[in-house]
Amino acid sequence: MRLSSRTRYGVRALFDLAYHGGGRAVLARDVAGRQDIPLRFLEQVFLDLKRAGIVSARRGRGGGYFLAKPATEVRLGDVLRAVEGPLDFGRCIHSHDGEMGPDQHVTGRCVTGQIWQQTGDLLRAHLDSITVNDLCDQASELGIVRAVALPGADAAATGAGPEARA
């Protein structure tokens, strides 16, 4: 299984807004540059995230994209659902004919269906346990330099400049 570029870019873009934006609106071209995402593609991803209520946008001077809710409340599962749709690995769906009881099955489809359902449940739980804030904490631990000085932080320590890249 492989995640689409759309989903991977969406996660990276949200991380960028939270980590490098410092609570301010960020231009899509700045996110695209730092994250090495094609701008036109990123704008499409931002539309999905905006429809899902994960990001908001502001026009004009000082405009750009920003998280619509705190990074502690944005989960990776939310991003996947916004971009890809429901996380569904399948479940046991087949018709029973009237002569059989509800626990009797003609094939082994329910056996494999249960496995895929459990796999989906585990994946959803894992993705829903990771927030954008967790990614920011990890970036801090890795020493990734922020593009914008945060309030109360030393500007030199936050590393404003083009080398700030995740």
Image (cartoon, rainbow, N blue to C red):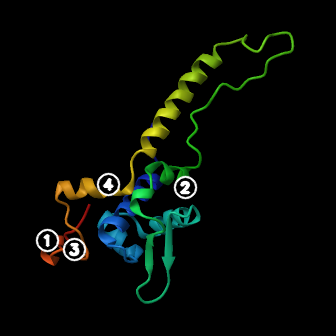
Q: Earlier in the sequence, mark 4 or mark 3?
A: 4
Q: Which numbered mark, 4 or 2, is in the foreground of this view?
A: 4
Left or right of 124, for residue 160? left
Q: Which numbered mark, 2 or 1, is in the foreground of this view?
A: 1
Q: Position of residue 73 (x, y in %)?
A: 44, 57
How far, Cα to Cα, is label 1 from label 4?
Answer: 19 Å
Tell me the quadrant of the picture where the N terminus can be found: top left
How far, Cα to Cα, is label 1 from label 3?
Answer: 14 Å
Q: Residue at x 37, y 63 (%)?
A: 37
Q: Are marks 2 and 3 in contact (CB under 8 Å)?
A: no
**Residue indicated by mark 2:** 82
Q: Position of residue 158 (x, y in %)?
A: 18, 71
In this rendering, the count of numbered labels is: 4
Q: Earlier in the sequence, mark 4 or mark 2?
A: 2
The part of the image, by quadrant, that contains residue 114 is top right
How far, Cα to Cα, is label 4 from label 3?
Answer: 20 Å
Q: Earlier in the sequence, mark 1 or mark 4?
A: 4
Query: Which SS class for mark 2?
Result: helix
Q: Residue at x 32, y 73 (%)?
A: 22
Up-down: is 125 above or below 119?
A: below
**Residue indicated by mark 4:** 135
Q: Earlier in the sequence, mark 1 or mark 3?
A: 1
Up-down: is 118 above or below 12?
A: above
What amino acid is labelled 3 in the image? Pro
Residue 162: assigned label? 3
What amino acid is labelled 1 in the image? Ala
Residue 157: assigned label? 1
Query: Which SS class for mark 4?
Result: helix
Q: Earlier in the sequence, mark 2 or mark 1?
A: 2
Q: Name the outermost residue toward the right.
A: 98
